[in-house]
Image: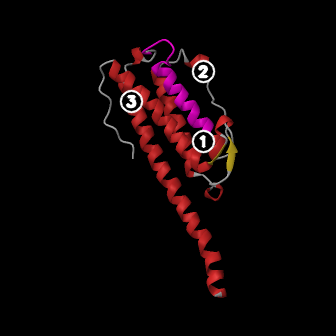
Amino acid sequence: MRFLCILSVLIFPQLLYCQWEALVGSHQQKMENACKYTQAVAELMPDSLYNYSPVGEMMTFKEQLIHLSENLIWLSSTYLSENKKTFPYDKVQLQKAHASEIKQITNESCRFAILQLSQLDTLTMLKKFNFGKHGQLNKIQFLNLIQDHHSHHRGQLVVYLRMKGIIPPKYNGW
């Protein structure tokens, strides 16, 4: 019996660690695919339509990409790596940026978030953070939030494409 207790104390943490590694690995792969899909969507919109918005109070195509990019950096640095990095671009200046610059920033933000995922300390997956009116969230919940937020804004970009008569790329989320 004593042997069984010692064995379980030694093996259980390793099994838990392997499960966290698998979870993070699947999120990393999904983020890589999501970013490729987002880039494909961004490429389809003509540069001349990056300032398009269906209605005045909605973000433009460009603003959607900027917001998505800023959010990837903020959430992944603040809550996954716990080494907060501010968005390195002036959002007012970005309003004047060419579509190619916005695509580059989106790509860099995606690479940054993927790097944070690849370096995530899986021993801290259940660590909780205060997140305003949402209460406390752990890193698993932030993994889901990052992907959900990314998908939400990319979905809006797809609608913008369709409103301009552009067929979006075939979905590849996994």
Q: Residues within 10 Å of mark 1 (few under 14, many from 20)?
A: many
Assess whether mark 1 and mark 3 are in contact (beta carbons under 8 angstroms): no
Image x and y of residue 122, in percent: 61, 57
Magenta-colored stretch includes residue 72: yes
Q: Which residues are the magenta region?
A: 53-76
Report the residue at 62% width, 46% height from top: 80
Instruction: Give the residue pinned by disc 1.
Output: 76
Residue 10 location (% of width, % of height): 63, 76
Kind of residue sitting beneath label 3: Val
Residue under pointer 3: 41
Mark 2 residue crowding within 10 angstroms, few (<14) / some (14–19) / many (20+): some
Q: CA distance from mark 3 to mark 2?
A: 21 Å
Are there few (<14), some (14-19), or many (20+) residues within 10 Å of tag 3? Answer: many
Which residue is drawn at the image coordinates 41% and 38% (left, top)? Answer: 36
Task: Characterize the magenta stretch by its predominant secondary structure.
Answer: helix
Q: CA distance from mark 3 to mark 1?
A: 22 Å
Image height of 174 relative to 167, above or below: below
Q: Amino acid at mark 1?
A: Ser
Q: Determine whether, in the image, residue 166 is placed left or right of residue 147.
A: left
Q: Could you tell me which secondary element the residue under label 1 belongs to?
A: helix
Q: Quadrant of residue 14?
A: bottom right
In which quadrant is the N terminus drawn? Answer: bottom right
Q: Which residue is mark 2?
A: 91
**In-front residue for pair 129/109:** 129
In 3D space, how far apart are the residues under numbered discs 1 and 2 (Cα atoms)?
A: 19 Å
Comes first in the chain, label 1 or label 2:
1
The front one of 100 and 55 is 55
How many numbered marks does the figure carry? Answer: 3
In the foreground, 15 or 90: 15
- Amino acid carrying label 2: it is Lys
